Image: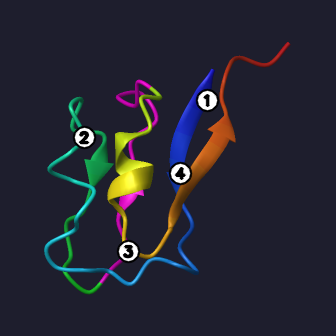
């Protein structure tokens, strides 16, 4: 299963974060306005809406799943 991840080197720590309001599962998290956002993997459904919403292209895909 694909899950979204934030590329911290690309994230501009926008305030407000453009990806947060489009996330239907509220997986895009951001607490400190000066810090990058992150994706809570357990909440991410893999819909991809946040990828299109980030104006800096800082959100990408990571293959998820269990090991072993």
Provide residue 30's location: percent of width, then percent of height: 24, 63
Residue underneath mark 4: 5
Would you place residue 28 above or below residue 67 in this image?
below
Would you place residue 5 above or below residue 33 in this image?
above
Between 66 and 47, the residue placed more toward the observer is 47
Q: CA distance from mark 4 to mark 2?
A: 13 Å
Task: Using residue 15 as the reference point, say whether residue 66 is left or right of it.
Answer: right
Q: CA distance from mark 1 to mark 3?
A: 21 Å
Find out whether residue 43 is within the magenta segment. Answer: yes
Query: Which numbered disc, 3 or 2, marks the residue closer to the eye?
Result: 2
Q: Which quadrant of the structure image shows residue 11? A: bottom left
Q: CA distance from mark 1 to mark 2?
A: 15 Å
Provide residue 22's location: percent of width, then percent of height: 20, 45
Q: Which quadrant of the structure image shows residue 36? A: bottom left
Residue underneath mark 3: 36
Query: Which numbered disc, 1 or 3, marks the residue closer to the eye?
Result: 1
Residue underneath mark 2: 23
Boundaries of the magenta span? 35-45
Q: Residue at x 37, y 64 (%)?
A: 54
- Contact (CB < 8 A) between labels 3 and 4? no
Give the SS element for disc 2: loop
* Label 3 packing within 10 angstroms: few (<14), some (14-19), many (20+): many
Could you say which disc has been placed on residue 2 in the image? 1
Question: N-terminal of the two: label 4 or label 2?
Answer: 4
């Amino acid at each position: 299963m694909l899950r979204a991840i934030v590329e911290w080197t690309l994230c501009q720590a926008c305030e407000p974060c453009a990806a947060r309001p489009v996330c239907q599962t509220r997986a895009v998290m951001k607490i400190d306005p000066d810090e990058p956002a992150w994706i809570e993997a357990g909440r991410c459904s893999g819909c991809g809406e946040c990828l299109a919403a980030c104006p800096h292209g800082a959100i990408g895909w990571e293959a998820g799943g269990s090991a072993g």
